[in-house]
Amino acid sequence: MTISKDLLEVKEYTSEGYKPVVDYDQWRVAVLNYCDELLPEKIDKMQKHDQTDEVFVLLKGQCILFIGEGEEDIADIHGEDMEPFKLYNVKRSVWHTHTLSEDAMVLIVENRDTNLDNSPEKDLNEDQRSQLVELTQNLWK
């Protein structure tokens, strides 16, 4: 016997990149899978969310969460090699981006209205871009 979709909704996302999977009231659950644009040598910007925190959970593979210090400008960049099944809460207005291994899958929980209008992006300079590559090499030896 199949359970009615009124009682249980089952979703999945297995393609490359980011995809919202469930939206409900004020929150959204999304999946981020590997995509070429998140290779460390291709990352050219960071973003922040001015109205919400954002939670990341590594489900499989590897993911480095890059955190940028600073309000308007990004001063220092740090890398956190995520551990599976731990919750990483990026606080409101903190610059961030990530790189993923080809087999990675990351669960994201965020406000439903998170979009480019309330999530400014900041271009990275050449030194900052090189720093992302270096951090990745050091963390994924």
Image (cartoon, rainbow, N blue to C red):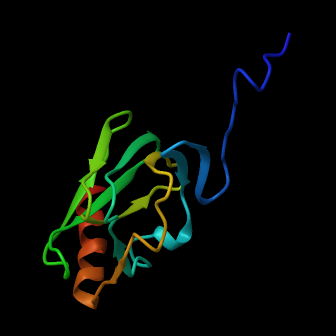
Residue 90 in the image: x percent, y percent? 28, 53
Q: Residue at x 55, y 70 (%)?
A: 36
Q: Quadrant of the N terminus?
A: top right
Q: Residue at x 39, y 82 (%)?
A: 44
Image height check: is 125 above or below 140? below
Residue 124 in the image: x percent, y percent? 30, 84
Q: Nearer the viewer, residue 122 or 137?
A: 122
Q: Nearer the viewer, residue 73 or 116?
A: 116
Q: What is the count of numbered marks? A: 0
Q: Quadrant of the C terminus?
A: bottom left
Image height check: is 44 above or below 136? below
Q: Nearer the viewer, residue 6 or 90?
A: 6
Query: Is residue 14 something one can see in this rendering?
Result: yes
Query: Is residue 103 something one can see in this rendering?
Result: no
Residue 60 in the image: x percent, y percent? 48, 40
Q: Residue at x 28, y 46 (%)?
A: 89
Residue farthest bottom in this picture:
126
Image height check: is 62 above or below 115? above
Q: Quadrant of residue 18?
A: bottom right
Residue 52 in the image: x percent, y percent? 33, 55
- Position of 112 with respect to 64 (left or right) is right
Q: Quadrant of residue 134?
A: bottom left
